[in-house]
Every structure is written in structure tokens, then in C-alpha cells.
Image: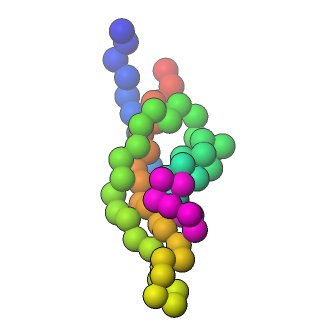
Amino acid sequence: MANHVYRLSEIVGSSPTSVDDAIRTGIRKAAETVRNIEWFETQEIRGQVVDGDVAYYQVRLKIGFRVED
């Protein structure tokens, strides 16, 4: 097994549905332009409240992607 070097990038995923969907939305969008994403770490969960109910979820993520040889 070869040694790998990873780079970190910070993104924010959002969704009106759930925290899970916010994470998946962020990862999918990042994967359109970043190759070799191999892991993520949640940093912060926040949201927007409208009329006493949750209207939007936002999740700040660190994504780790392998630097190519």
C-alpha cells in the first residue's frame, strides 16, 4: 500500500430537508470539480428558522481528497 497525501477543503452544504441531505448536497457538488474525495468531517450545523419552524439546514464540512502522484 502506497503512502498518500491528502489536502483539506472547507465547504458548506445546505438543504431545506435535513442535515443528511445538506451533507450529501455539499459532497455531490464538490465532487463535480474536486477529484479523489475520500472522506469528510462535519464542523458545524446551523439553520434558518422561519415562523417558528426550521426552514433550512446548513452544514460546514471539511473534505479530504487525495493528492495525485
Coordinates of residue 29 in the picture (x, y in percent)? 62, 50
Left or right position of 38 against 33: left
Q: Is residue 11 part of the magenta span, yes or no?
A: yes
* Count of numbered badges drawn on the protein: 0
Name the residue: 40% across, 50% down: 62
Q: Is residue 19 left or right of residue 33?
A: left
Q: On screen, 1 above or below 41?
A: above
From where the camera sits, is residue 55 visible?
Answer: yes
**Which residues lie in the magenta part?**
10-21
Q: Is residue 52 above or below residue 62?
A: below
Residue in the image at 42% along x and 60% along y: 60
> What residue is rendered at 48% in x and 53% in y?
20
Of residue 7 and residue 23, the one placed in the foreground of this image is: 23
Residue at 51% over, 90% down: 51
Q: Is residue 25 magenta?
A: no
The quadrant holding residue 31 is top right
Q: Is residue 2 above or below residue 65?
A: above
Residue 26 can be seen, yes or no: no
Outermost residue toward the right in this view? 32
Colour pattern: rainbow
Give the farthest residue toward the top.
1
| Along the line of sight, the residue nearer the viewer: 60 or 57 | 57
Quadrant into which the N terminus falls: top left
| Residue 15 x %, y % | 56, 64
